[in-house]
Amino acid sequence: MDNSKIRLLIVEDDLLVRTALEMIISEMGHEVVGSVDNAVDALFEFTSKRPDVIICDIGLKDQVNGIELTRKMNMLKKCPVIFLTAYDNEDMFNQAKKVAPLAFIPKPIERPILERTIELAAAHAMEDVGFVVNALPVEGCLYTRVGNKLKKIAISDIEYVEVDGKYCSLALSGRIINCKISLRDIIEKLPKQEFVQISRSSIINLNFIIDIDLANQAVHLPSGEISIGRNFKDGLLSRLNLI
């Protein structure tokens, strides 16, 4: 991968502007990891995707404007922020300075200015100071978006995970919670000492195993039976304390 490629989060409530930003960023060879129109979605994408740079409209039509949103993000990670604004307002400018944005770009956006600013942001992103909290989400828990709230899930309650593309289902004591996350990303968030992948699309919590049917290649858990993939059987058995 090109070391100059960065991952950007766009927070803009004008669909046409947001679409134009996505196109320009893609044509520059960078990656848009999230494109949202409000602060709630922005915080969720920020904590789950961990972008290198944020492009944020100051005047979000939301209870939380771009300045307050950036303040909340800065509590988690010092991330370069490029503010977009359609207003030449000195008071707003002075408020925005307090969160130390990398740059201000006036609307309507001029592409050459945007491209130069993104390249400047890329240089800052390479210095990555990292998240203030070393392990997100909170240790022992996951959080998933449900409406306008983040629902807390205790990792120790998860019996198994089944993944289909960018979506996964978490089984907890007979109930299922669906999330938008890939297999690779969910594996990184689960403690390796307790969870093991047993097929191309399934991960189980070793603490919930009732028994393993070697003849039918399946693991029995309180909430159901999960098939063991042929290439994953040895990995599973190596994690068991056999006698």
Image (cartoon, rainbow, N blue to C red):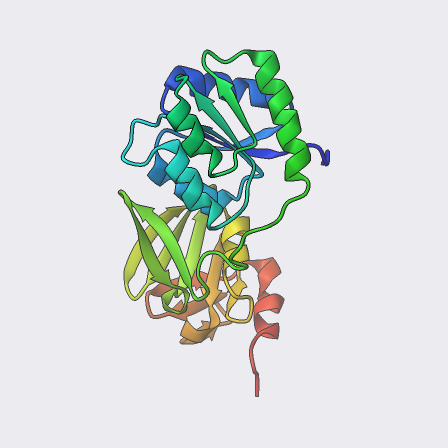
Q: Which residue lies furthest to the bottom in this view?
A: 243
**On the rendered structure, is 241 left or right of 106?**
right
Quadrant where the C terminus sits is bottom right
Q: Quadrant of residue 68?
A: top left
Quadrant of the rendering where the N terminus is positioned: top right
Image coordinates for residue 179, horizontal then vertical, percent: 38, 47
Whether residue 12 is visible, yes or no, is no
Whether residue 160 can be seen here: yes
- Which of the two residues, 187 or 29, is positioned nearer the viewer here? 29
x 35%, y 60%: residue: 153
Quadrant position of residue 29: top right
34 in relation to 219, above or below? above
Q: Where, by quadrant of the figure, is residue 171 drawn? A: bottom left
Q: Viewer-proximal residue, 75 or 9?
A: 75
- Which residue is found at the position 68% from the left and 43% from the top? 127
Residue 199: give x, y in percent of width and height: 53, 57
Q: Position of residue 2 (x, y in %)?
A: 73, 33
Along the horizontal axis of the image, is 233 left or right of 90? right
Q: Find residue 197 and report its horizontal and vertical position in percent.
A: 54, 60
